[in-house]
Amino acid sequence: MDTLIEKAKKIRLLTLDVDGVLTAGGMLYGQDGIEAKHFHVHDGQGMRHLLQTGVEIAIITACKSPIIKRRMEDLGVTHVYQQQTNKLIAYEDLKRKLNLTDEQIAYAGDDLPDLPILSRAGLAITVANAPKIMRQHAHMVTQKKGGKGAAREICDFIMESQGTYQTIIDSYLAR
């Protein structure tokens, strides 16, 4: 059986859920009824770095929000699937579009709607504060909670496993 590092070396696409992975899962509504989301800056930085190494990033989420669209545009993430009540459809579409196999895809989710993809992805990841059932079906459980740096941890782990993280560090040291 492949180790986590061996699994991560094969990854060409990191797919992430939003609420509970990129956010802490809280829902904030203003008096005007407009929703607000809180994204962690470290997660965004990790996603930018991973994209620089040639690993694609995709979002698959059940919700629909202009906030998600805006944040992903800011980060350069072009594969964004919103309103996905059956996330497996989007996952299969990504596989086809990018010509990838399951073992080349990492997926990070935090709750039962993510389970169908978690059971297929080559590197199945959940966050530290996910329900027990999710931790039981994941290859990797982050140390950080969702919305609190978990995505950065995942991105750094993939880059470290693929030997590309030092290039990112060196690019900052050379400035």
Image: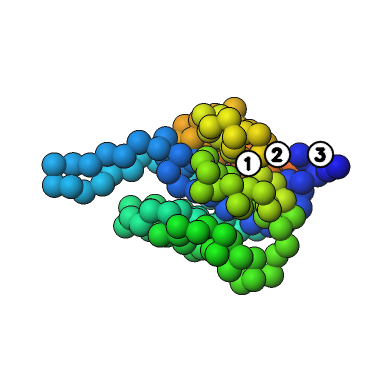
> Is residue 56 something one can see in this rendering?
yes
Sequence-wise, the earlier of marks 2 and 1 is 1
| Cα gap from disc 3 to disc 1, whole angstroms | 14 Å
Which residue is labeled 3 in the image? 3
Relative depth, front residue between 96 and 56: 96
The percent coordinates of residue 131 (x first, y second) are 53, 32
Residue 125: which numbered mark, if any? Answer: 1
Residue 63: which numbered mark, if any? Answer: none
On-image quarter of the C terminus: top right
Which residue is labeled 2 in the image? 139
43 sits left or right of 173 in the view: left
On-image quarter of the N terminus: top right
The percent coordinates of residue 145 (x first, y second) are 51, 30
> Is residue 53 something one can see in this rendering?
no
Q: Secondary structure at mark 2?
A: loop
Sequence-wise, the earlier of marks 2 and 3 is 3
Q: Secondary structure at mark 1?
A: strand
At x 45%, y 47%, the residue is: 18
Relative depth, front residue between 80 and 158: 80
Q: In front: mark 2 or mark 3?
A: 2
Type of amino acid at the residue the image marks with label 2: His
At x 81%, y 39%, the residue is: 3
Relative depth, front residue between 79 and 110: 110
Sequence-wise, the earlier of marks 3 and 1 is 3
Whether residues under marks 2 and 1 lie with C-beta atoms below 8 angstroms apart, the answer is yes
Q: Identify the residue at the far left of this view.
A: 31
Type of amino acid at the residue the image marks with label 3: Thr
The percent coordinates of residue 129 (x first, y second) are 51, 29
Q: Residues within 10 Å of mark 1 (few under 14, many from 20)?
A: many
At x 52%, y 40%, the residue is: 110
Q: Is residue 117 above or below residue 131?
A: below
| Count of marks placed on residues | 3
